[in-house]
Image: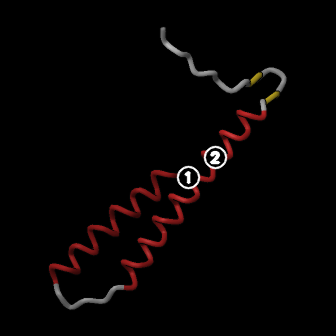
Amino acid sequence: MAKTLEQPEVDLDSGFISEDARRLAEQHRTERERQRQALNLQRENILSQKTSNPARRTALEAALIQIEGQIQAMG
């Protein structure tokens, strides 16, 4: 027998949101904020690095573009 997962109770008509749904939404928000902070720290780390090596500079620029893309995708 398959075990079904209970969905948090949300009644859009009355605006009622169960405690479980509220807690789950807060966990998602917190996780997104942690991810955003981690990406910003990586971005700052890359920006703080100075190098005269062209290959290293190219790699840092590529990493910076990727990180900034991820930040934008998060909204």
Amino acid type at circle 2 is Gln
Other-residue count near label 1 (Cα within 10 Å), few / some / many at <14 / 14–19 / ≥20: few
- Comparing labels 1 and 2, the label whose residue is closer to the camera: 2
Location of residue 66 with respect to 75 vertically, above or below: below
User: Residue drawn 78% across and 30% down?
Assistant: 17
**x then y, percent, for residue 39:** 45, 65
Label 1 sits on residue: 32
Label 2 sits on residue: 27
Other-residue count near label 2 (Cα within 10 Å), few / some / many at <14 / 14–19 / ≥20: few
**x then y, percent, for residue 23:** 71, 41
Side of 38 where 51 appears, left or right: left
Q: Which mark is residue 40?
A: none
Location of residue 42 with respect to 30 vertically, above or below: below
Q: Is mark 1 on a helix, strand or loop?
A: helix
**Distance of mark 1 from mark 2, alpha carbons?**
9 Å
Q: Within the image, what quadrant is residue 61 found in?
A: bottom left
**x then y, percent, for residue 62:** 26, 68
**x then y, percent, for residue 74:** 50, 52
User: Residue drawn 48% across and 69% down?
Assistant: 40
Choose between 19 and 56: the one closer to the eye: 19
